[in-house]
Amino acid sequence: MTEIIKIPAQAKEIVKNKRTGVVYTDKAEFDADVVNPATDTTVEDFQQDLEITVASLTTKPEAN
């Protein structure tokens, strides 16, 4: 049986307006911008990305 190696990683959610490029702290802030009558932001402007940072892996040379 093959052993599954767990790799340490961090995930960061990025919420932004795909039309204007504005980055929000979270989805709730984006939703508040949508309902704000002073802006023209719509639900269709929503963009959500996930940034994954994986720990660097190095392999050990095999012993001869």
Image (spheres, rainbow, N blue to C red):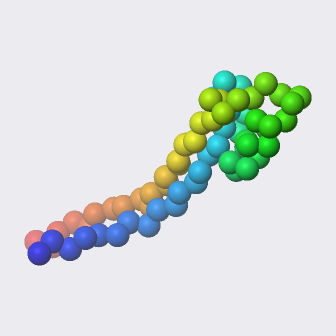
Tell me the quadrant of the picture where the N terminus can be found: bottom left
Residue at x 73%, y 50% (from the top left corner): 28
- Relative to the observer, which residue lies in front, 33 or 48? 33
* Horizontal arrangement in the rendering, residue 36 relative to residue 58 (left or right): right
Q: Is residue 30 above or below residue 45?
A: below
Q: Is residue 47 above or below residue 39?
A: below
Q: Residue at x 20, y 74 (%)?
A: 3
Q: Is residue 37 above or below residue 28?
A: above
Q: Position of residue 57 (x, y in %)?
A: 36, 61
Q: Nearer the viewer, residue 56 or 33?
A: 33
Taking depth in this image into account, of 60 and 10 the one nearest to the observer is: 10
Please state the horizontal and vertical placement of residue 50, each as a whole percent of the image.
53, 48
Q: Considering the image in quadrants, where does the C terminus appear?
A: bottom left
The answer to whether residue 10 is left or right of residue 56 is: right
Q: Can see residue 42?
A: yes
Question: Residue 24: x, y in percent?
Answer: 73, 43
Q: Quadrant of residue 38?
A: top right
Answer yes or no: is residue 21 visible: no
Question: Which residue is at a point 76% across and 46% down the rendered structure image?
Answer: 29
Residue 42 as seen in the image, left or right of residue 50: right
Mark count:
0
Residue 61, quarter of picture = bottom left
Q: Residue at x 55, y 43 (%)?
A: 49
